[in-house]
Amino acid sequence: MDDAVNSGLVAIERFARVLHRDLDAVYNAIELPWSNGQAEGQINRLKTIKRAMYGRAGPELLRARVLPLDQNRHHIK
């Protein structure tokens, strides 16, 4: 990280400084056997769907896009 901070490349320097601030989190991500990646992926997926549908569709269409296919059939009227 010292080499990156002294590299003269602004983007690399900035990345190294931010990485240094979060060094405990980096070590934990490498050392610990578990992760919240699966939950973060689902949250990102839902936010993407909501952004795409904002103002264009009602809750029924959002529910149809979010729920698995077999559960969608129970919500159709």
Image (cartoon, rainbow, N blue to C red):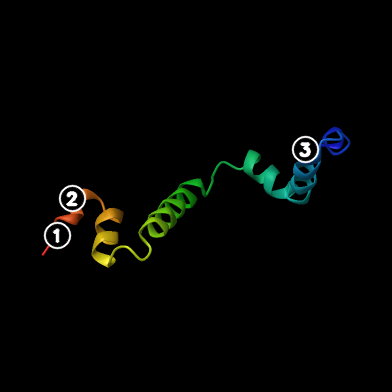
Q: Along the line of sight, which residue is nearer the eye, 27 or 19?
A: 19
Give the residue at mark 3. Answer: 12
Task: Look at 46% across and 48% down and name the residue there.
Answer: 41
The x and y percentages for residue 29 are 63, 43
The x and y percentages for residue 24 are 72, 49
Amino acid type of the residue that numbered disc 2 sits on in the rendered structure: Asp
SS type, badge 1: loop
Task: Look at 43% across and 53% down and name the residue there.
Answer: 48
Give the residue at mark 1. Answer: 74
Front position among marks 3 and 2: 3
SS type, badge 3: helix
Left or right of 18 in this view: 38:
left
Give the residue at mark 2. Answer: 70
The x and y percentages for residue 76 are 13, 61
Q: Along the line of sight, which residue is nearer the eye, 77 or 37?
A: 77
Left or right of 34 in this view: 16:
right
Q: Rounded to the nearest whole Å, what is the CA distance between mark 2 and mark 1?
A: 8 Å
Q: Counting other residues with Cα less than 10 Å from the Cα at mark 1, is it few (<14), some (14-19), or many (20 or more)? A: few
Q: Are the residues at dot 2 and dot 1 in contact (C-beta closer than 8 Å)?
A: no
Amino acid type of the residue that numbered disc 3 sits on in the rendered structure: Ile
Task: Look at 75% across and 48% down and name the residue there.
Answer: 18
The x and y percentages for residue 57 are 29, 63
The image quadrant of residue 4 is top right
Task: Look at 25% across and 60% down and name the residue there.
Answer: 61
Q: Rounded to the nearest whole Å, what is the CA distance between mark 3 and mark 2?
A: 47 Å
Amino acid type of the residue that numbered disc 1 sits on in the rendered structure: His
Mark carried by residue 61: none
Q: Residue furthest right?
A: 6
Q: Is the C terminus in the top left, top right, bottom left or bottom right quadrant?
A: bottom left
